């Protein structure tokens, strides 16, 4: 089985959307469809995948803007950690605050659990709270790939001054859960360029490996 994946920025805040699947079953997932549903659907078609789930790293509006349309077009289920449900319930308010058009989005179909195994692509859901209480990173061990959402960025970390944010919790999530993964793992953050766990352990000034 070969795993294929593609990440690209979408939506008004250029959230990194990731599509991942395998070439044996041709089934996979969309992670953080933050806008541009036509572009996402075009990429799914080129990759020849049937989307089985729409997974969200957290419930800020810029990671959800195309969720309703992707669900409508693919029939895929929506997945979110329950600790972010309070943010999900304010999606319309979040959009209004940033003057972004709101599309009514169905409630999550499934609650993501820490350590949950994803059926395809050898993926694991890792609860990494701090940016939000329900922030989740998705680790694909065979591919040495981590989709970190807004928990860890290249040379930076997610902000913790928004509702539910907690710096100490974020620091613990990064040090105990992310930095413990293989250093060669490529990290696809919620925004901006990719990095690697090894690079962040060596150079990230916001969360050090042993501090």
Image (cartoon, rainbow, N blue to C red):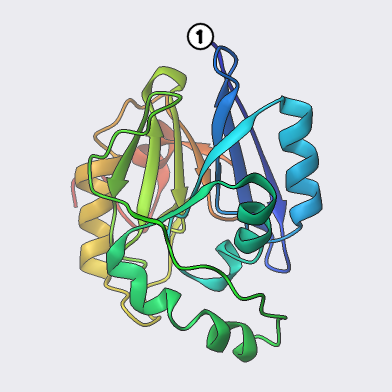
Say which residue appears at 52% left-offset and 68% top-offset. Answer: 106
53 over 62 or under it: above or below: above
Q: Residue 98: percent from the left, percent from the top?
A: 65, 85
Q: Is residue 11 left or right of residue 80?
A: right
Q: Which x, y percent locates residue 204?
A: 40, 49
* Numbered-mark total: 1
Q: Quadrant of residue 107?
A: bottom left
The local crowd at label 1, few if under 14, some if 14 to 19, many if 20 or more residues have their Cα within 10 Å, is few
Kindly state the secondary structure of the residue where label 1 is placed.
loop
- Is 208 situated above or below 106? above
Is residue 88 toward the left or the right of residue 71 in the image? left
**Which of the pair 149/52 is nearer the observer?**
52
* Residue drawn where x is 24% and y is 43% of the image: 177
Farthest residue in the top direction?
Answer: 1
Q: Residue 116 versus residue 192: which sits nearer the camera?
A: 116
The one nearer the camera, 135 or 22, is: 22
Is residue 130 depicted above or below 198 in this figure? below
Q: Position of residue 50 (x, y in %)?
A: 62, 32
Q: Which residue is mark 1?
A: 1
Q: Nearer the viewer, residue 113 or 206?
A: 113
- Is 44 left, or right, of 130 in this rendering? right
Q: Is residue 63 visible?
A: yes
Residue 49 is situated, as x and y percent measured from the top left of the image, at: 65, 28
Determine the residue positioned at 47% across, 83% down: 90
Left or right: residue 11 versus residue 26 is right
Q: Could you say which quadrant of the image residue 28 lies in?
A: top right
Looking at the image, residue 43 lies above or below residue 113: above
Residue 193 in view, yes or no: no
């Amino acid at each position: 089985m070969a795993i294929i994946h593609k990440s690209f920025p979408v939506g008004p805040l250029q959230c990194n959307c990731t599509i991942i699947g395998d070439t044996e079953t041709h089934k996979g997932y969309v992670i953080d469809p933050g806008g541009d549903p036509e572009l996402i659907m075009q990429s799914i078609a080129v990759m020849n995948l049937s989307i089985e789930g729409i997974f969200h790293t957290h419930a800020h509006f810029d990671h959800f803007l195309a969720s309703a349309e992707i669900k409508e077009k693919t029939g895929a289920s929506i997945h979110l950690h329950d600790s972010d449900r309070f943010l999900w319930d304010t999606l319309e308010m979040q959009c209004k605050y940033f003057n972004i058009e709101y599309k009514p989005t169905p409630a999550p179909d499934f609650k993501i659990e820490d350590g949950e195994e994803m059926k395809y692509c050898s993926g694991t859901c890792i609860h990494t709270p701090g940016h939000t209480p329900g922030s989740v990173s998705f680790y694909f061990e065979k591919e040495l790939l981590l989709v970190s959402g807004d928990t860890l960025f290249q040379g930076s970390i997610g902000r913790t001054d928004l509702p539910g944010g907690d710096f100490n919790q974020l620091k613990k999530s990064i040090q105990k859960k992310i930095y413990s993964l293989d250093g060669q793992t490529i990290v696809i953050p919620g925004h901006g360029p990719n990095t690697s766990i090894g690079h962040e352990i060596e150079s990230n000034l916001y969360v050090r490996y042993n501090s």
